[in-house]
Image (spheres, helix red, strand yellow):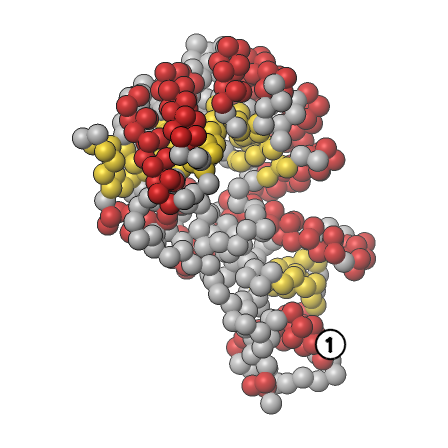
C-alpha cells in the first residue's frame, strides 16, 4: 500500500551532471547524490502518485526511510515569534554621513552630505541597550559603528560612546563587544586607540592601488591605497581581529584571485567578505554595473581556493548553506540602528526618513518606536516571497537582501533570473558539493567520470 510511505520533508533536486542530482532537504539537512529515477520517485511521493516499492527502487526507499525523509517527523520551518516588547541589547550607530573618501559606487553617496550624530544620542542608545541587557540577564551588550559615512571622523561621539559602553557594561556585570566598520583612512594615533577598545574591525578595501585608487579615491581625488594598507599593517602589528569587506566591479572581477592573493601574502585578516557591486546611490548615478554573474562566480571560486590554502574564511552573503533561516538578516526583528539624524532603522542600506525600514526616532530624550511599523517589518521573511518557493536556497539566503529587493527594477517573478539569485544558487551548490565530497568517496568518482557541473540554468523542484 502506497499510503505506508509519507514524504515528510521538502526536497529539491539540484542539477549536478547529466542525469545526476543533489537531492536536498534544507530543513532536515539531508543531502543525497541521486539519479533521475530516485528524483522521480520522490516527486511521485510528493504528488501522491507513487506506485509502490519494487526491486528497482527498494534501496532508494530504504535510504529515504533511514534519513527521516519518509515517515519521519514533519518539517518545522523556522519561525520567529513576535517579540512581546521592543528591548534591544545591541545597537549599531551610523555616526555620520561625512566621509573622507568618494567611492565611485557608494550606495549611500557618502560625503555628499555631512549629517553627524549628536553625542547625547549615541550615549542614550548605549545606555538603553545596557539597561535592557541587565534587565534581561543577557551576558553582553554589542555596540557597532557603521553607516553611510566614515565613523572615525566623528571621533568624540565614537570614543565617548565606546567608553560609556565599556564602563556601564562593567558596572552591570556585562561584557561589552565593540565593533567597527571603517574605510581605513585614519592616522595611526586613532588606530592605536581603537585597538585597545574595538573587538573586531571590518576594513573596506578593494585591492592593490590599481583598483583601490580607481574606485575608492579620497575626497580630494587622490589615492587611498597607501593609507589603508598602512592601517591594515598597524592592525596586524597589534594582533587585532579584523576582516576585509571587498566590493567587486566589472573592472576587478577577472583579477579577483590576484587581489586575494595580494591581500593574504601581505596581511593577516581573519575573514574576507566579497560582494558584487550594488548598483544604487553613486553607482547608479555614474552608470556603474555589477560584474556578470558568471564572471563573479568563476572568479570567486578561484579566490576561494586561494583562501582555503591559507585557512582563511572567504565568503559571500548570499551563500550560507550552514544557516537555516526564514530571513536574510535581522530586518524583521526591528534591529536597533540609529542614523545621524536620530532615526531608527532596521536596515543598514535603507535609512532615510521615507524608507520602509525606518520605524522610530530619538525624540525628547528618548527612543520612540512605531509598533505598527515594527509589526510590518516582521513580514519580511522568505514565506512572503512566492518567487522563492521552488528555489533550493530559500532556507539559506531566505529571499536575499530586503533592501536590494526593494530597490530592484525587476518584477519579483523575474528575481530568480537576476544576477544575485544566480550567484546565490551557484555558490550554495558549491557548498553542498563540498559537503558531499567531504563525507563520500562516491563524489570523487562521479566528478572524475562527469567533470565539473554545468551552470545552473534552472532549478528542478523534486
Q: Is residue 164 left or right of residue 223?
A: left
User: Residue 300 occupies which quadrant of the picture?
Assistant: top right
Identified at 53% across, 14% down, the residue is 192
Q: Residue furthest left?
A: 364
In percent of width and height, residue 163 lies at: 41, 22
User: Residue 5 occupies which quadrant of the picture?
Assistant: bottom right
Nearest to the observer: residue 346 or residue 349:
346
Say if 87 sits above or below 229 in the image.
Answer: below
Q: Is residue 325 left or right of residue 92?
A: right
The answer to whether residue 346 shows anywhere in this view is no
In percent of width and height, residue 73 lies at: 54, 72
Nearest to the observer: residue 234 or residue 393:
234
Question: Which part of the image, by quadrant, shows the C terminus?
Answer: bottom right
Say if 141 sits above or below 59 in the image.
Answer: above
Nearest to the observer: residue 41 or residue 266:
266
In percent of width and height, residue 311 lies at: 70, 35
In percent of width and height, residue 297 lies at: 61, 41
The answer to whether residue 67 shows anywhere in this view is yes
Identified at 48% across, 29% down, the residue is 179
Residue topped by disc 1: 59
User: Residue 121 occupies which quadrant of the picture?
Assistant: top left
Question: Which part of the image, by quadrant, shows the N terminus?
Answer: bottom right
Identified at 53% across, 54% down, the residue is 324
Q: Residue furthest bottom?
A: 1
Q: Is residue 378 left or right of residue 369?
A: right
Amino acid at each position: 500500500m502506497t499510503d505506508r510511505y509519507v514524504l515528510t520533508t521538502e526536497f529539491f533536486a539540484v542539477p549536478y551532471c547529466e542525469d545526476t542530482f543533489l537531492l536536498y532537504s534544507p530543513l532536515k539537512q539531508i543531502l543525497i547524490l541521486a539519479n533521475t529515477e530516485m528524483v522521480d520517485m520522490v516527486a511521485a511521493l510528493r504528488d501522491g502518485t507513487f506506485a509502490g516499492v519494487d526491486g528497482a527502487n527498494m534501496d532508494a526507499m530504504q535510504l529515504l526511510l533511514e534519513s527521516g525523509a519518509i515517515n519521519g517527523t514533519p518539517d518545522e520551518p523556522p519561525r520567529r515569534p513576535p517579540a512581546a516588547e521592543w528591548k534591544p541589547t545591541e545597537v549599531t550607530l551610523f555616526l555620520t554621513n561625512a566621509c573622507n573618501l568618494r567611492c565611485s559606487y557608494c550606495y549611500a553617496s557618502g560625503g555628499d552630505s555631512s549629517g553627524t550624530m549628536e553625542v547625547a544620542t549615541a550615549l542614550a542608545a548605549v545606555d538603553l541597550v545596557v539597561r535592557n541587557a541587565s534587565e534581561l540577564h543577557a551576558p553582553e551588550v554589542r555596540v557597532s559603528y557603521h553607516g553611510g559615512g566614515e565613523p572615525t571622523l566623528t571621533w568624540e561621539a565614537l570614543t565617548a560612546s565606546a567608553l560609556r559602553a565599556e564602563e556601564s557594561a562593567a558596572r552591570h556585570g556585562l561584557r561589552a563587544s565593540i565593533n567597527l566598520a571603517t574605510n581605513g583612512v585614519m592616522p595611526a594615533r586613532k588606530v592605536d586607540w581603537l585597538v585597545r577598545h574595538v573587538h573586531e574591525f571590518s576594513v573596506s578595501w578593494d585591492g592593490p592601488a590599481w583598483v583601490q585608487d580607481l574606485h575608492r579615491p579620497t575626497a580630494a581625488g587622490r589615492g587611498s591605497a597607501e593609507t589603508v594598507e598602512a592601517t591594515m599593517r598597524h592592525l596586524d602589528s597589534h594582533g587585532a581581529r579584523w576582516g576585509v569587506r571587498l566590493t567587486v566591479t566589472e573592472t576587478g572581477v577577472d583579477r579577483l584571485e590576484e587581489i586575494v592573493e595580494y591581500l593574504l601574502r601581505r596581511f593577516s585578516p581573519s575573514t574576507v567578505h566579497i560582494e558584487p557591486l550594488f548598483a544604487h546611490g553613486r553607482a547608479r548615478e555614474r552608470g556603474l554595473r555589477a560584474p556578470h554573474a558568471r564572471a563573479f562566480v568563476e572568479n570567486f571560486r578561484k579566490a576561494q581556493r586561494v583562501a582555503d590554502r591559507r585557512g582563511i574564511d572567504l565568503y559571500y552573503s548570499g551563500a550560507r548553506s550552514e544557516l537555516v533561516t526564514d530571513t536574510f538578516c535581522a530586518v524583521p526583528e526591528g534591529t536597533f540602528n540609529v542614523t545621524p539624524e536620530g532615526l531608527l532603522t532596521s536596515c543598514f542600506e535603507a535609512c532615510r526618513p521615507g524608507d520602509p525600514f525606518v520605524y522610530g526616532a530619538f525624540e525628547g530624550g528618548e527612543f520612540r518606536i512605531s509598533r505598527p511599523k515594527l509589526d510590518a517589518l516582521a513580514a519580511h521573511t522568505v514565506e512572503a516571497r512566492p518567487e522563492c518557493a521552488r528555489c533550493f536556497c530559500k532556507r539559506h539566503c531566505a529571499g536575499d537582501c530586503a533592501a536590494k529587493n526593494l530597490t530592484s527594477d525587476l518584477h519579483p517573478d523575474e528575481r530568480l533570473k537576476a544576477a544575485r539569485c544566480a550567484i546565490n544558487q551557484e555558490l550554495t551548490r558549491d557548498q553542498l558539493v563540498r559537503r558531499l565530497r567531504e563525507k563520500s568517496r562516491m563524489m570523487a568518482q562521479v566528478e572524475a567520470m562527469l567533470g565539473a557541473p554545468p551552470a545552473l540554468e534552472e532549478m528542478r523542484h523534486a
